[in-house]
Image (tube, helix red, strand yellow):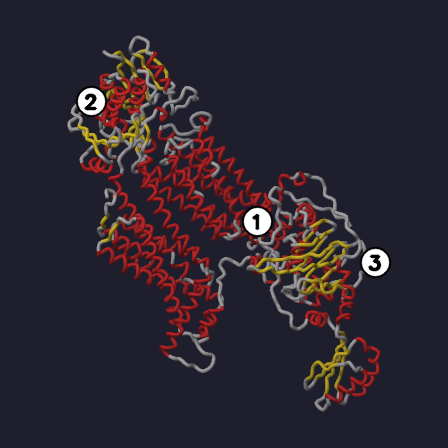
Amino acid sequence: MDRKLRETSLFQQTMALFWKNLLLKWRRKWHTILEWLQNLAFVLVMLLISVMGLSTFVQLEYNSPAEVLGRLDAVDRSNNFKVGYVYTSPTSRDIMEKVAKSIIIPGIKVQEYSDEGNLLDDMTNKAVVGVTFVDKFSYHIRYPINNIAYPNDYFAFMGFCAPGSQACYPTYYWSRQFLSLQASIDSAIIELTSNHSVWDNMASVVTVRMKSTVASFRQYFHIGTFIFLMPMCYVSLMYLLSLYITRERREMRELLKMMRLKDLAFWLSWGLLYLFYILILANLMTLVTKAFVFVQSSYGIIMFLFVFYGIALMSFTFMLSALFRSPRATAIAGFFITLFLSALGLVLLRKDFPQALAVLLSIFPQFAFAVGLTESVHMESDLQGVYFSDMAGDSSHVLSSFISLALDSIFYMGLTLYFEKVLADKHGLKYEPFFFMKSSYWSKKKLSPVLTQTEDSGESSMGEFFERVPIDLHGKEAIRINKVMKKYCDQDKNIEALRGLDLNIYEGQITALLGHSGAGKTTLLNILSGLCPASDGSATVYSYKLSDMQHLEEIKKRTGFCPQSDVKFNPLTVKENLTVFAKIKGIPRKQIKHKVQKVLSDLQMNDIENVEADNLSGGQRRKLTLGIALLGDPQVLLLDEPTAGLDPCSRHHIWTILKENKADRVTLFSTQFMDEADILADRKAVISNGRLKCVGSSLFLKRKWGIGYHLRMQVSPTCDVELMTSIIKQHVPDAKLTAQNEEELTYTLPFENMDAFPDLFLHLDGQVGNSIVNYGVSMTTLDDVFLKLEGEGEIEKGDYGVFSPDSGAPEDKDCFSAGMEDSLLLMSDSGSATLSGLSLWRQQVLAIARVRLLKLKHDSKTFRSILILLALFIIPIIMTTIVIKIFHKVITWELTPSLYFQHPEDRFHRYYTDLQIYNNTGSSIEDFLGALKEQNIAVQVVNGEYDMETTFYRGAIEVSQATKGYGFTIVGNPKAQNALPVLVNIISNALLMIFNSTEHIRVWNHPVTEYLVEDFESVTFYSGFMLLLFASGLAPHFAMSSIEDRRIKARTQLRISGIFPSAYWFGQALVDVPLYWILLFLMVAILFSFNSQVIFSFVPAIILITGVIGYGAAVVLYVYVISFVFGRGKSHHDGWSIFFVISAFIPMILLDVVSTYAVGITFFLLLPASTLSGIIRCIQSAPIIIMDFHSS
């Protein structure tokens, strides 16, 4: 009979799973609270950093008029000006010899050095300014970092300088004679190149600071920290999301897909829920950052930047969840990828980072977000901010980030759906890699079933082992199985679960699969349900091929499947579970309530409909799983041991339901209960070792393989057994005595001797009252048939299937080896005691220690957790080392016009402005303007003097008439940190081009940071010691094994075996304490390996060694106490680890805030894990020696 097949709805499925996810969060309130506390912890960190940043953040709003600083040759020269350079070529010597005679810096002293190391030493100790030449036209000017402005615009005073202020960083270029030295070197290069002297022109350059109204200052460290931490704002959220999704996919993916759940519906259901999370966190992050970073910017545009990033990062997390099968591996991979890409975003602090490479790397949402952040910080530094109204203008970079993040969201969502199709679980079906290129995949044309032959399948070749079906069933073959094989690769072995199995299943009949464990019943049902593919052979369901993915979708429309494992969403009640699955199966909304209520009534579950699934008994969970399979009235019903764990009454009730509804339906079930198969099934198929052994009705099987009838007699004590046996054999020669005791005899009577039964019974009736009390005859059962078919020597083994235990062991399950049993035998003898007292105690301690070692050897989860914490310790040290190594490169900037001035073809931008030229010569200056255009600078020319009220342009040059050539006045905007040296460079190159030279002078501000290395290294070392506090979180991951021992009743068994309680704990400590010592000293060794120049004196070395030894033993014993007191439930290693780390950090913070050791001592006494901060505090207060290897 053709049934109306229901089409599933993406919207209905998405809403069903979304509702399920909401209920999950609501029912698990404690987990939800902890999740939000973890998410809000990052917001708190950002708030603390903001508060720290506010102490150095300056925002002033009052007018500072323009100020004439003076000529380049009029700088105060109270101190002798010394310049050193490294000889690189005769040209560099010629240039510096002319600089030594400079009229711009009279009295300048120039010294030549043979190598840069000696120059750096003198720069540090003797206040020498360094010059290093790249070539004749390119050079670096090197001041100590504290004597010159940071060239990096992101981290400096911007926009305001009070008149006469000594802290006006942009004017340092003039007051510290940077401009004078630059002009001298440029004049020397021009003279050597063109044989024209411009010394007078350059010496007469007047420097002016432009008018400003607002100033802001942010420290380099805080801005860099924000740029690094911002992309990690969702790392906790995505970590937990990946755990939830990957765990649910691993447990339910194949079953949900069998119910025709659309892939997109699964991901959208989680995406909708976590979109609310993202909106909340985005608003919180915007509120926090508005206080410090994005002061000028629009709240909405920053909030939307966070939202777009959160959505893109969620899609990225979905893609990782589709790639990895392990929840923990997925979460860890996502964390470290985000950490790495967040650090990569720091390269954007260099303005010369290639734009094309930035666009390419924006394929990663973390980097695309960093691009928007960095450019927004750049606009904030310019006191402009970003706004929606300016999205097509100066804020266009945010629009680019929005577009990049939106494209990333679509791209990674597409990858997620692609991987969902082409990547299967261990035994799952999958699409071909290029399935989307086939027109048939996108075609909406209705599929037609394939034409199959109607003659009997290969099961008829079994001859006498096959019972032919009635003629009226011919043509009603609903399921055709033809030579189906299934092989599994397990530890380099090929295991054949099915070996060329042939079988037909007929519509209107109930067919039972019988066989020992491991015969292949579950595997066959999994293949027919589409959960796993066959290795060879073919199978069709209503003439649709299981091997064709599109045909498989048609099969799923008709199929209801009840697997061996329980199908349920734990936080949901029975009724809610049925409702969710009804919506997933595509039952119309108007019919869902009726269909669910019918299943509840049919399976007698009305009284438990409001009970949560995780509170159900085993039998009730089995009913729920069967009810889910029955939802939607499927045409094909595949049931894998549907009544396992049910009481007899419930089993009989289910048999009645299945028999009443077998018409126009094909039902195939497996069972271990022979009476169930005998009563319920019309046909029985016995499978043995993957092969079909026989097929037929109960009567056929009993006649063919039955042992006949059972004759049971209750006899009197005086009965002569041999005489009674001879009487029976007189009538039935082949009769056998199978059981005998004082009161009962049991014989088997073959079918062939049924004609002799009347005479036998007549004879036995005559003995009733004498030797026989009573007797009875019963026919053989299916149990007898099964035992005869299988034989007594059949080896029990596990069935292979999608849901078999070997398909994926739980992550938190400890692995035990046979060696542990040998260790346990050492604890006590089952016979006479050979040891006692201290000797027995010592042997028990060693035995427990050996068991502990073996458990650690096989416990990969513990070592993964330890490696993660070690990585959290090492990564910040590595990153700090890298930052220090590249610090001088980050702040080294070429002073080029492209920093502030537009090119002629660029669109208008308020940050990159035209160069304003004031022509005060009274005549044409076309030669000078032509030289500027040769430098690809957009200029605007105004006749007359410079307007002192101008604030718009980044820089301006006033050109006047001099005695010889032009005179210049340069005007630098305080918002442009390096405007003044850039303007000098523009003038130098213009003069060089006026003299018909095609060369181009290039100059870098390259501050000297090498003398800060010692300070950096001490900071790195002590920061690393602070990170040692993460070591306090290691112990709970390996020292809480007693909780697992209690859970599996091992502790109880040990006590029964006579173990001393102290021997148990000492044996554990014998392994755990040395392991903790090794980890602690390993972390110290790692710290010293990154700080090899640090040498401890005797006192801190002793404090460190004794502190580590004492702390390691104390914390392990402390964890034992926690395990004993709080170990009755599940062990929460991660929770206790986080608690230990926090408790270690709190005293360190309190000691800084309260400045009293009483608080710290109180913490140390109450929380032993926090004593590590006290040890670190003592070491930090002790002197260390930092060896200087840089000069050697």
Q: Residues within 10 Å of mark 3 (few under 14, many from 20)?
A: few
Residue where numbered disc 2 is placed: 102
Res 471 label: 3
**Which residue is at the far top?**
923
Are dots 1 and 3 in contact, CB under 8 Å? no
Residue 776, how many percent across, how many down?
76, 80
| Mark sitting on residue 1094 | none
Residue closest to the far bottom: 718
Q: Quadrant of residue 1163?
A: bottom left
Q: Position of residue 1005 (x, y in %)?
A: 29, 30
The answer to whether 733 is drawn above or below residue 21 in the figure is below
Judged by depth in the image, the label closer to the viewer, 3 or 2, is 2
Q: Where in the figure is residue 751, as x and y percent of width and height? A: 79, 75
- Residue at far front of view: 90
- Disc number placed over residue 20 in the picture, else none: 1
Badge 2 vs badge 1, beta-carbon distance below 8 Å: no
Measured from the top left, where is residue 106 in percent x and y? Answer: 17, 23
What's the amino acid at mark 2? Ser
Query: In this rendering, would 646 be left or right of 1041?
Result: right
Residue 225 appears in which quarter of the rendering? top left
Q: Quadrant of the C terminus?
A: top left
